[in-house]
Image (cartoon, coloured by chain):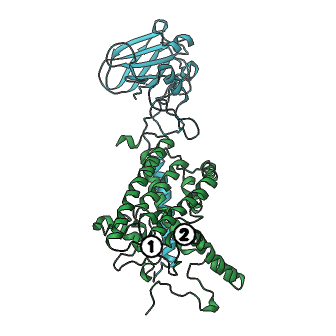
């Protein structure tokens, strides 16, 4: 070429390149959906876990491990470290606010457990608190006046079709679900992690 | 559009790249046959063209062996090692893979420009430019160390946080796109395309040894980088393919190693360390000051 770019032009070019790289990579680090396929494991280092066809046991096991990438997800506030009642147990009962209900269909079921076994089996027969109220989009409030101590672990369900069950398809929940202490849709907190004392508790309803 | 943001495994993305890679090979072989029919039709067919084509595929095999089989493990391992130091946490999905491809294309611009303007790198890249013909088989004409340089130039992408396999996929796709550009059959495309994308026309100019065509149009997928950085030239006169000093051979050994031979000979014969360095790291036209300095290059006699 009769006229090569001058050193200045080249320097400008390189500077542009470095800036373009940095801004693009920064943007890319924020490009991710909050939805992940169930049972997702980044397989660069491990064997491919394909598809979404899992049994309920496999699903529960997979979500226990959670995604490898961390993102700024909305936080469900629950668990004994985060609510007001950890400061002092009150006598106002257990006041549960269920956030993020997606529609008005069916009912919201709230189950409160005070022992590990019942909590892990979601056995509402052994729940110390149980209520079922009409779903309302946005936030639904439930109070258990008689629950004044703790620790309690709370499980919530958005039963849209009123069959009293969390419906699944191919191992993926089709309805809303959540529990105290769960920060993401894939958390399955232990009783200890989910534990709250009486007072005000905010729990997020997750949908996949 | 949401599927672009769904988390993907890097393995999934690389599987798609492999799929395209394999199918392109099939399509291009058919297209090459068509180009040969054209040679016959315009009476340019000769044993030399056939020999040149066979040699192209031989260099492909040699390059493949050196770059992938010998150094492949090191390639991938070094990427994963450096990835530990990533600055950003970038999720692997189709959207970020596309961004990675665009960045890899920008990387390739600089890598390609480096290969033309620094003798050390030119010694391997000259193999690709040494054919006097221009058909799809020339796309597969590779030099001995063509696969090594990309490792270093793409490290920044790893450091920025893109997944190693996705970066490799991006490199492959940037090369794959260019494969289709090595033809005389496709004339200039509509202006908007010619403005943004690299095209057969742009790439013919890049392969030209005409004075005004030398060291231009370095782009991989996009020509926009050349426009930005001042190295873009439009095709207006007939392109003369090959090197400024042709090698006039279809012998695969000569073709594959002539770059090393020429640069090596200059370096060894140079007087003084400074001149040796000049030949090694200077541009192809470099000549020591006491011999008259840089001479302008062209395959055409200067008036």
Rendered residue at 49%/72% (across/down): B129
Residue at the extreme bottom: B303
Between B25 and B252, the one lying in front of the other is: B252
Residue B125's label in the rendered image is: 2
Q: Residue B30 placed where, x, y %?
A: 37, 57
Q: The green chain is which one?
A: B
Crowding near the residue tagged with mark 2, few <14, some 14–19, many ≥20 C-alpha atoms within 10 Å: many
Residue with the mark numbered 1: B207
Residue B247's label in the rendered image is: none
Sequence-earlier tag: 2 or 1: 2
Dot 1 lies on which element? loop
Dot 2 lies on which element? helix
Would residue A67 be found to the left or right of residue A101 on screen?
right
Q: Residue B36 placed where, x, y %?
A: 37, 66
Q: Residue A8 placed where, x, y %?
A: 50, 77
Chain A shade: cyan
User: From mark 2 to mark 1, how far is it between C-alphas?
Assistant: 12 Å
Name above or below for residue B265 compared with residue B16.
below
Would residue B188 be found to the left or right of residue A205 on screen?
left
Is residue B114 visible in this depiction of the protein?
A: no
Would residue B11 be found to the left or right of residue A162 on screen?
right
- Quadrant for residue B210, please give it: bottom left
The quadrant of the rendering that contains the C terminus of chain B is bottom left
Between A195 and A172, the one lying in front of the other is: A172
Is residue B193 visible in this depiction of the protein?
A: yes
Name above or below for residue A155 compared with residue B198.
above
Q: Answer yes or no: are tags 2 and 1 on the same subunit.
A: yes
- Quadrant for residue B133, please give it: bottom left
Name above or below for residue A129 compared with residue B272.
above
């Amino acid at each position: 070429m009769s006229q090569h770019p001058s050193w200045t032009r080249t320097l400008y070019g390189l500077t542009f390149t470095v800036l373009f790289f940095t801004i693009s990579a920064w943007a890319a680090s924020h490009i991710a959906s909050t939805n992940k396929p169930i049972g997702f494991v980044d397989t660069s280092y491990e064997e491919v876990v394909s598809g979404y066809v899992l049994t309920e046991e496999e699903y529960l096991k997979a979500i226990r491990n959670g995604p490898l990438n961390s993102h700024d997800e909305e936080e469900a506030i629950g668990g004994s470290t985060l609510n007001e009642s950890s400061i002092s147990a009150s006598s106002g009962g257990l006041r549960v606010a269920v956030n993020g209900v997606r529609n008005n269909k069916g009912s919201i079921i709230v189950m409160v457990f005070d022992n590990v076994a019942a909590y892990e089996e979601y056995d509402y027969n052994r729940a110390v608190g149980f209520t079922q109220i009409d779903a309302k989009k946005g936030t639904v409030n439930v109070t258990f006046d008689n629950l004044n101590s703790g620790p309690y672990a709370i499980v919530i369900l958005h039963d849209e079709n009123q069959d009293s069950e969390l419906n699944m398809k191919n191992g993926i929940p089709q309805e809303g679900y959540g529990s105290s202490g769960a920060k993401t849709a894939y958390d399955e907190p232990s009783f200890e992690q989910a534990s709250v004392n009486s007072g005000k508790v905010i729990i997020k309803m997750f949908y996949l | 559009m949401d599927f672009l943001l769904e988390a993907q495994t890097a393995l999934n993305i690389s599987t798609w790249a492999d799929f395209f890679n394999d199918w392109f090979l099939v399509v291009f072989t058919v297209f090459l046959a068509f180009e040969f029919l054209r040679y016959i039709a315009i009476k340019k067919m000769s044993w030399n063209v056939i020999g040149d084509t066979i040699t192209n595929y031989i260099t492909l095999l040699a390059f493949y062996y050196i770059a992938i089989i010998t150094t492949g493990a090191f390639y991938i391992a070094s990427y994963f090692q450096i990835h530990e130091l990533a600055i950003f946490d970038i999720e692997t999905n189709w959207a970020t893979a596309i961004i990675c491809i665009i960045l890899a294309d920008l990387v390739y611009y600089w890598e390609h420009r480096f290969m033309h303007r620094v003798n050390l790198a030119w010694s391997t890249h000259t193999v690709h430019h040494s054919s006097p013909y221009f058909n799809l088989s020339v796309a597969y004409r590779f030099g001995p160390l063509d696969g090594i340089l990309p490792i270093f130039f793409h490290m920044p992408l790893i450091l920025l946080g893109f997944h190693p396999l996705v970066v490799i996929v991006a490199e492959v796709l940037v090369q794959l796109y260019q494969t289709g550009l090595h033809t005389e059959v496709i004339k200039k495309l509509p202006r908007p395309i010619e403005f943004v994308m690299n095209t057969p026309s742009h790439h013919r100019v890049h392969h030209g040894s005409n004075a005004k065509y030398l060291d231009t149009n370095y782009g991989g997928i996009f020509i926009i980088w050349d426009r930005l950085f001042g190295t873009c030239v439009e095709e207006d006169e007939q392109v003369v393919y090959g090197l400024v000093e042709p090698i006039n051979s279809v012998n695969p050994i000569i073709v594959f190693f002539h770059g090393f031979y020429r640069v090596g000979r200059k370096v060894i014969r140079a007087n003084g360390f400074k001149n040796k360095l000049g030949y090694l790291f200077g541009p192809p036209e470099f000549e020591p000051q006491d011999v008259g300095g840089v001479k302008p290059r062209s395959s055409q006699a200067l008036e």
